[in-house]
Image: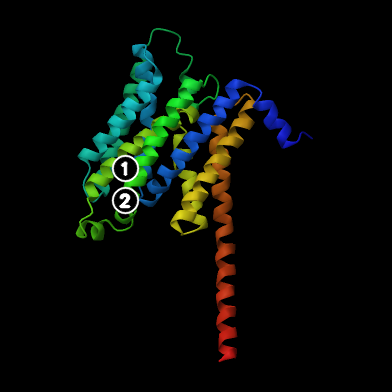
């Protein structure tokens, strides 16, 4: 049986795998942090839409003959601005209808771009399901800079955003600019979706944005601990997916989804056991206190 350290040495002997691990790590951290706020704010449908929008963006860029990164970021950030400007301040059903409308229209545009492309668009599969091949050092550097800027911006608005996410009405009453924070967060979410699309593909960004964060919030209610745990889970899913994809013919997006989903299922199964144990400890403590009295 091959030892893990031997596997890592073999993988890192190839420059393209080193770049893949670097890019995957950057994307995992960014997606996990943004995903944590997405789950907390109950904006997973918006996150799903922005992830799907990366496909028509990449298809449009391919049709125009420019780097697909321009399409990813242009369409994801543009769609985020549309959702932010047109949505209601307090959210609700109207936001869901708007989000679904934007998603359906832009997906239709994506298939139109694919149909209009006269060349052999063999990269559609990688656009949809992701690939770790061909990640260059320039792409890694670009992703790192974008992630640093996005995380820096999120750090600046983090405290008021958390307040607005937990109770928007109270936050607004206390002078917190809830609408501006919502717009800024959606733009950052668009940036995160565009970044993750380049690794997981358009269809499976949702897994990296939502499942590690949702799993972490199942395991603990402490904000900082939950956020850190979400990052670790996202890194574990991404690294595991890179190793599995290297040794198999299947796309990396499938493995990211599978590993992230497995973690979520285990957390769901473990939660009743953990809550039952905590309840038993509280009951025992009450009994001991009663005896002592």
- 146, 274: nearer the viewer: 146
- 155, 127: nearer the viewer: 155
Q: Is residue 71 above or below residue 281?
A: above
Q: Is residue 32 above or below residue 69?
A: below
| Res 82 → quadrant | top left
Where is residue 69? Give x, y as percent: 39, 22
CB atoms at circles 1 and 2 under 8 Å apart? yes
Q: Residues within 10 Å of mark 2 (few under 14, many from 20)?
A: many
Residue 251 is at least partly visible in this image:
no
Where is residue 270? Give x, y as percent: 59, 58
Quarter of the picture holding the C terminus: bottom right
| Disc sitting over residue 185 in the figure | 1
Q: Residues within 10 Å of mark 1 (few under 14, many from 20)?
A: many
| Res 186 → quadrant | top left
| Res 83 → quadrant | top left
Give the Cα distance between marks 1 and 2: 8 Å
Residue at point 55% right, 27% down? 20
Q: Secondary structure at mark 2?
A: helix
| Mark closest to the chain's N terminus, 1 or 2 | 2
- 263, 105: nearer the viewer: 263
Residue at point 44% right, 29% down? 143
The colour mode here is rainbow
Residue at point 59% right, 34% down? 241
Q: Is residue 228 above or below residue 292?
A: above
Tell me the residue that label 2 is attached to. 161
In the displayed structure image, the side of residue 95 where residue 60 appears, left or right: right
């Amino acid at each position: 049986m091959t030892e893990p350290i031997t596997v890592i040495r073999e993988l890192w002997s190839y420059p393209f795998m080193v770049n893949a691990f670097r890019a995957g790590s950057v994307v995992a951290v960014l997606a996990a942090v943004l995903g944590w706020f997405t789950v907390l704010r109950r904006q997973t449908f918006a996150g799903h839409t922005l992830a799907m929008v990366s496909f028509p963006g990449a298809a449009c860029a391919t049709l125009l003959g420019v780097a697909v990164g321009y399409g990813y970021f242009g369409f994801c950030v543009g769609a985020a601005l549309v959702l932010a400007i047109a949505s209601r301040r307090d959210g609700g059903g109207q936001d869901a209808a708007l989000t679904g409308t934007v998603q359906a229209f832009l997906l239709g545009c994506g298939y139109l771009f694919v149909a209009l492309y006269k060349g052999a668009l063999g990269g559609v599969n990688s656009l949809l399901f992701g690939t770790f091949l061909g990640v260059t050092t320039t792409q890694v550097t670009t992703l790192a800079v974008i992630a640093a800027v996005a995380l820096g911006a999120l750090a600046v608005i983090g405290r008021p955003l958390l307040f607005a996410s937990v109770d928007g009405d109270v936050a607004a009453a206390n002078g917190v600019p809830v609408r501006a924070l919502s717009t800024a967060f959606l733009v950052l979410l668009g940036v995160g979706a565009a970044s993750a699309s380049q690794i997981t593909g358009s269809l499976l960004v949702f897994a990296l944005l939502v499942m590690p964060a949702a799993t972490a919030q199942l395991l603990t209610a402490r904000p900082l601990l939950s956020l850190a745990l979400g990052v670790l889970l996202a890194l574990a899913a991404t690294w595991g997916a890179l190793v599995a994809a290297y040794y198999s013919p299947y796309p990396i997006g499938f493995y990211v989804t599978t590993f992230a989903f497995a973690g979520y299922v285990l957390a769901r199964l473990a939660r009743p056991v953990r809550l039952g144990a905590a309840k038993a400890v509280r009951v025992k403590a009450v009994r001991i206190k009663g005896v002592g009295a």
